[in-house]
């Protein structure tokens, strides 16, 4: 039997590598494309011996050539943390625009189903809470975060244009805060930042008063939701995230307790356009995909802390 082939852009990144692993587990051949700008071979080295896995180092904003049939194209290439997209603003905009165009072109040429990894950041600093898919967002297009927010908003518009005009079979997942093994220690996101600081015995850095809220989804749950969406018939955007909301200050206290290191909490000025609230409305995912997160926060955090504990000697690479 001929196995389905899937192309994953950004496949050496945090989410991309977990997605490659899951697709291989679904019996597919996986072609992982990544320029390793923010991805790492360490995330996929355990897959190199798999007969169905191929890695190609390529910048998807230039050109994507994949010989042979392709059933699925999953576009996950993009810097995705505040540090990354503030240091790489042009690359972030290019992969959201040119990269999405090239990935959609590949899907069109191959007659493949296309899935875009979008983000809760399309909602900006939301004026509606929790955020349903129908909400259009409150984004500052010229602020420092705008390079990521608007790149993803443009990518969604491009995806829907290819769906409507070219008839490409498309899916859009809006990913909310996701955490788990293979996150980079110094990527600026709150989970690796707090864990790294706690394990090193340093104060946990909380921006503002810490009353801004976030909702954290363990990576296994997130990938399960993405796969369900890929195999569904839903062409409109779908939120995939954990609706269990908590303040950043509360989260810092949980990390401190689980890491077993009662370090201080240090407050610093709030970054520009930092969202005050973030909580997905997952009604659509519940009803149409039969999906809801299952991994309790503390269980997922223990697994993530153990990953960072084991990786600490290599954290400076």
Image (cartoon, grey):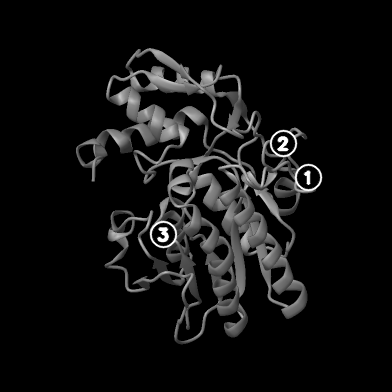
Question: Which class describes the residues within 10 Å of circle 2: few (<14), some (14-19), or many (20+)?
Answer: many
The residue shown at (56%, 42%) is 144
Q: Are marks 1 and 2 in contact (CB under 8 Å)?
A: yes
Which of label 3 and label 2 is nearer to you?
2
Of callouts 3 and 2, the N-terminal one: 3
Q: Is residue 214 left or right of residue 11?
A: right
The residue shown at (63%, 33%) is 275
What is the residue that sits farthest to the left in this orientation?
A: 313
Above or below, 177 relative to 172: above
Tell me where residue 22 appears, x and y as whole percent.
Answer: 46, 59
Residue 21, which numbered label? 3
Tell me where residue 265 appears, x and y as whole percent.
Answer: 42, 15
Name the residue carrying label 1.
135
Of callouts 1 and 2, the N-terminal one: 2
Question: Which class describes the residues within 10 Å of circle 1: few (<14), some (14-19), or many (20+)?
Answer: some
Report whether residue 240 is seen: no
Name the residue carrying label 2.
126
The residue shown at (55%, 35%) is 216
Q: Quadrant of residue 255?
A: top left
Query: Element at badge 3?
Result: helix
Question: Which class describes the residues within 10 Å of circle 3: few (<14), some (14-19), or many (20+)?
Answer: some
């Amino acid at each position: 039997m001929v196995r389905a082939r899937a192309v994953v852009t950004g496949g050496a990144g945090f989410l991309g590598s977990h997605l490659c692993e899951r697709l291989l587990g679904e019996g597919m051949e996986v072609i992982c494309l990544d320029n390793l700008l923010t991805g790492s071979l360490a995330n996929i080295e355990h897959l190199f011996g798999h007969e169905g896995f191929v890695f190609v180092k390529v910048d998807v904003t230039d050109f994507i050539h994949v010989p042979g049939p392709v059933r699925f194209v999953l576009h996950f290439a993009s810097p995705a943390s505040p540090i990354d997209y503030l240091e790489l603003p042009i690359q972030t905009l290019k992969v959201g625009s040119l990269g999405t165009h090239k990935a959609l072109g590949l899907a069109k040429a191959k007659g493949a189903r296309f899935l875009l990894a979008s983000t809760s950041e399309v909602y900006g600093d939301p004026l509606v809470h929790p955020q349903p898919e129908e909400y259009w967002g409150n984004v500052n297009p010229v602020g420092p975060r705008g390079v990521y927010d608007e790149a993803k908003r443009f990518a969604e518009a491009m995806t829907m244009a290819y769906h409507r005009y070219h008839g490409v079979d498309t899916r859009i997942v809006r990913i909310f805060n996701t955490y788990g093994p293979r996150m980079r220690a110094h990527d600026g996101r709150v989970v690796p930042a707090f864990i790294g600081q706690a394990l090193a015995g340093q104060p946990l850095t909380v921006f503002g008063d810490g009353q801004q809220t976030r909702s954290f989804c363990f990576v296994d749950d997130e990938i399960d939701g993405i796969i369900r969406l890929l195999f569904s018939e839903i062409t409109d955007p779908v939120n995939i995230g954990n609706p269990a909301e908590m303040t950043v200050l509360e989260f810092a206290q949980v990390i401190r307790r689980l890491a077993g290191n009662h370090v201080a909490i240090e407050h610093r000025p709030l970054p520009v356009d930092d969202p005050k609230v973030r909580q997905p409305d997952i009604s659509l995912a519940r009803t149409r995909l039969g999906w809801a997160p299952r991994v309790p926060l503390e269980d997922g955090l223990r697994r993530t802390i153990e990953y960072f504990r084991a990786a600490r000697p290599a954290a400076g690479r």
